[in-house]
Image (cartoon, rainbow, N blue to C red):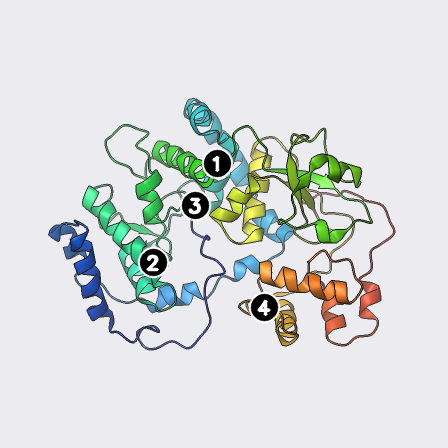
Amino acid sequence: MSFGLVGLALAGPLLADGCNPQPFSRWLDGVRQEARAQGISGKTLDQLDGLGYSSKVIAMDRKQGVFAQTFLTFAGRMANNYRLTHGKKYMREYADLFQRLEAEYGVPAAVITAFWALETDFGANTGNFDTLTALATLAHDCRRPELFRPQLLAALEILDRGYLSREQMKGAWAGELGQTQFLPSDYLKHGQDADGDGRIDLLKSKADVIASTASHLAHLGWRKGEPWLEEVSVPAQLDWEQANLETLLPVSTWLQWGVRPIRGKLRGQNLKASLLLPMGKDGPAFLAYDNFRIYTEWNKSLVYATTAAYLATRLAGAGKVAVGRAEVASLSLAETKALQRLLQDKGHDVGKIDGIIGAGTRAAVRAEQKRLGLPADGYPTQPLLAALQGDPTAASRALPPSAGYSAPFIH
C-alpha cells in the first residue's frame, strides 16, 4: 500500500550511501547469495546487475507531510467526485465479480473500490519508481532492513515466476506494486488470477486487482456482514477520554450517552464500536467497528484510514460528512511540530517531530488536556498549544461550547 509505511521513518544524518556502513555493492552480493539459496534462478538474479542506490527514494521516505492535513481537508480532496463517479461505474461494470468475491471473502464492493480509488485512481497512477532499486535502497538502509530485505527477495520471486517483467516492475517509492499498491510479499501471498490468463497481473488486470484486494482484506481479518464506519453526532458533554480506538463499547452504551446516527438507524446496533473523533469533540464523529481496524492495518495514518473508510461509506450510499458542532482551531504543520517539541520536553513520547498527529501525539495531548482540566479528546488545537506555551487565558478558550450540535456539510 502506497502510504502504508507512514510513521516508520526516523530522522537522522545520512552517509553518502545511506546510514549502512557496508558499501551497497558488497551488501547486494549478500542478497544474491540469499536469493540463490531460496531457489531464485540465475537469469532472474542477473536483474540485480548494475542496480544502484537511490537518494531520491530515501528523500521520499523522509517526506510524508500529506498526513499532517486535517481529516476534513484530506477527505475533501481525496473523496472527490471523480473517485465517487468512477468507483460506482466500476462497481457496476464488475458487479458479478464483486458479488462472487463478497460471497467468498465477505468484503463489500465499496470497501475494495475505495482502496482502489485512493491508492492509484483505479490504476492511473501506479508509480514509476524502479521497484528493485527502491527496495534495495530501503533494504540497505540501516533503519528497517528486516522489513525491506524480505520484500526485495519477494520482488525477485515475482520476476522468477513470470508474473511481471523487469520493465513492468515499476511502482511506488517504497516498493509497492499494482493498482492497490501491494508489497511484493502480499502480491505473492494474496494475488489472484481472476481473469484466468495463468498469471497474476496487479498492474494491468482489473479483475486480478479486485480479487487480490478482496483476498488480502480477508486475510487481514475482515468480518463478513458487519459495518466498518458510521457517522454520528455527539452531545456537547461526554467523557471524552472514552473516545479513542482502544475503547470498544456496545453501541447501546454510546446511544445511552447521547451519541446519535446522523441519518437513519445504525447498522451496528448489536455490535461494539469505538467513538472516533478525527478532529476532536467539535469536528466530525464516527462509530468505528471491528472492521475499521483493517483500515489501520492497511495504513498506519489515522487520517488516511478514516478517509478510506469514509469513502467506502460514500460508495455504499452514505451522504457527505458533517463538519461538526463548531469550527475546529486546528494546528498548521509548523504549529504541530512546535506542539510535539513542547510535549517531548514534558517527557511525552511523541515519536518523530514531523507534524503528523499519530498515536503518540494524541496520547500526549490527552494527558496534557487532563492536566489542564480540558476535555481530553486527544486532538491538538491552537488554544492547547498556547496554554502549553504559557498563555494563562488559553485554557478557558478551549473549554466546550454550550451550543447544541449542528451539521453543515463539506463541499
Give the secondary structure at mark 3.
helix
Q: Residue 349, which numbered label?
A: 4
Mark 2: few/some/many CA within 10 Å (<14, 14-19, 20+): many
Q: Nearer the viewer, mark 3 or mark 2?
A: 2
Q: Earlier in the sequence, mark 4 or mark 3?
A: 3
User: How far is mark 4 from mark 3, CA to CA?
Assistant: 34 Å
Q: Kindly identify which residue carries mark 1.
A: 113
Residue found farthest to the left = 42
How far is the residue under mark 2 from the one under mark 4? 26 Å
Question: Left or right: where does residue 32 sit relative to residue 193?
Answer: left
Q: Nearer the viewer, mark 4 or mark 1?
A: 4
Q: Secondary structure at mark 4?
A: loop
Pointer 3 local density, CA inside 10 Å: few below 14, some 14–19, many at least 20: some
Residue 150 pos. (x, y %):
30, 55
The numbered disc on residue 52 is none
Dot 2 or dot 1: first in sequence order is: 1
Label 2 to label 1: alpha-carbon separation: 27 Å
Say which of marks 4 and 3 sits in front: 4
Picture disc at residue 120: 3
Q: In terms of depth relative to the viewer, which is nearer, 239 or 21?
A: 239
* Snapshot quadrant of residue 121: top left
Does residue 4 appear to the left or right of 265 in the view shown?
left
Q: Is residue 352 visible?
A: yes
